[in-house]
């Protein structure tokens, strides 16, 4: 299995025995999020983000939420701006936005539950988040090149081909692929049920005949050799016989993209970007693409219209006077006159 970057340890938050201390309040806050049926990923992100702030405060001998002031919040925001990762790169503005947003929600909850009298984070001005286009999007030929890399003569290679085909055909998220069950695929109807996707929402998406054929081959020939009892019914299994973790999927797909040597880097989400872009370029209605990808807002899907510019390119070629290289250019005509 491919190796990955070593995860940084979570910052310690201090003594949770103090009921008015921020560590204890954070534990209570996360418990409330679980009670309200927030996803485990959402709760973990909230815990990680607020934990980072509590650790920063502890270095300054501040342990209680009632001791936090607005100037402290302002200094923390500046500290995030100047913070550097282990590779020397700064935190992205999106990361800063998410960390500060989690902090605002935490303090809003503290005030609402009467743990503190006023909210020192209420006036945080969140940084503007850049809306960047996907760095790399696959063409159909590039996607096929990646899909043909696994050695289908082995059970693991057959599994890998089926996984890549499923990613490419459905555009599902990596976590959705990791939790896919053998019972979620309806071969007769050509659909996949994605259960409890982002936002804990179920949805049904189509899957192509080619991907279904590889899935069936994998189920018949490879999965029985990989499964470990008791069988929990997960579609794709790692070498341990257990389902993949999302992080392992990222490293695994990224290795195949690198091995294809197409001059592009990416992983599971690059396939998702590519599915949306290729479908829009081929005339798919944006509402259908939104439903397939499970976007809550059409604005998220419209983002891909900025990448799928094939129609704009065709219009540019047909109408712009300099779009085509003519046989006789003005420069060549001038040379003819001079001779």
Image (tube, rainbow, N blue to C red):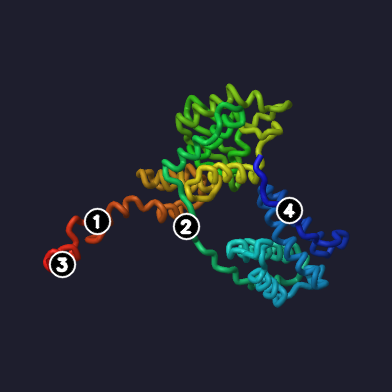
Residue 174 falls left or right of residue 321: right
Q: CA distance from mark 2 to mark 3?
A: 43 Å
Residue 334 bears which disc, if any? 3
Residue at disc 1, secondary structure = loop
Q: CA distance from mark 2 to mark 1?
A: 27 Å
Residue 314 falls left or right of residue 265: left
Residue 116 falls left or right of residue 321: right
Where residue 65 sits in the image (x, y, percent)? 78, 68
Looking at this view, name the residue that lies furthest to the bottom: 71
Q: Residues within 10 Å of mark 2 (few under 14, many from 20)?
A: few
How many numbered discs, if any? 4
User: Which residue position is annotated with label 4?
Assistant: 32
Residue at disc 3, secondary structure = helix
User: Which residue position is annotated with label 2?
Assistant: 133
**Residue at 55% over, 34% down:** 150
Where residue 68 sits in the image (x, y, percent)? 76, 72
In this rendering, which labeled residue sits more in front, label 1 or label 3? 3
Work out whether mark 2 precedes mark 3 in sequence or the reverse, and give the earlier one: 2
Q: CA distance from mark 1 to mark 3?
A: 19 Å
Where residue 297 sits in the image (x, y, percent)? 49, 52
Query: Are dots 2 and 3 in contact, CB under 8 Å?
Result: no
**Residue at 45% over, 29% down:** 209
Residue 334 is at least partly visible in this image: yes
């Amino acid at each position: 299995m491919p190796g990955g970057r070593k995860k940084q340890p979570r910052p310690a938050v201090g003594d949770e025995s103090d009921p008015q201390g921020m560590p204890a309040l954070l534990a209570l806050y996360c418990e409330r999020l679980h009670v309200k049926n927030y996803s485990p990923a959402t709760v973990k992100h909230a815990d990680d983000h607020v934990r980072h702030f509590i650790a920063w405060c502890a270095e300054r001998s501040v342990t209680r939420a009632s001791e936090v002031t607005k100037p402290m919040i302002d200094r923390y925001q500046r500290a995030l701006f100047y913070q550097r990762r282990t590779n020397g790169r700064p935190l992205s503005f999106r990361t800063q936005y998410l960390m500060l947003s989690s902090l605002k929600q935490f303090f809003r909850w503290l005030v609402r539950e009467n743990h503190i009298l006023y909210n020192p984070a209420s006036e945080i001005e969140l940084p503007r988040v850049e809306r960047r286009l996907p760095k790399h999007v696959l063409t159909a030929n590039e996607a096929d090149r990646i899909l043909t890399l696994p050695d289908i003569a082995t059970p693991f290679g057959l599994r890998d081909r089926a996984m890549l085909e499923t990613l490419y055909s459905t555009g599902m998220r990596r976590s959705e692929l990791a939790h896919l069950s053998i019972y979620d695929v309806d071969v007769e109807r050509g659909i996949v049920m994605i259960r409890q996707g982002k936002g804990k929402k179920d949805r049904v998406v189509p899957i192509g005949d080619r991907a279904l054929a590889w899935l069936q081959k994998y189920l018949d020939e490879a999965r029985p050799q990989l499964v470990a009892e008791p069988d929990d019914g997960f579609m794709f299994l790692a070498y341990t016989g257990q389902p993949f973790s999302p992080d392992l999927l990222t490293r695994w797909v990224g290795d195949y993209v690198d091995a294809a040597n197409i001059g592009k880097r990416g992983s599971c989400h690059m396939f998702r970007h590519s599915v949306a872009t290729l479908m829009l370029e081929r005339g798919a209605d944006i509402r259908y693409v939104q439903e397939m990808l499970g976007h809550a807002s059409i604005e998220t899907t419209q983002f891909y219209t900025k990448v799928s510019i094939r129609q704009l390119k065709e219009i540019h070629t047909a109408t712009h006077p300099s779009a085509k290289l003519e046989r006789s250019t003005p420069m060549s005509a001038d040379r003819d006159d001079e001779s």
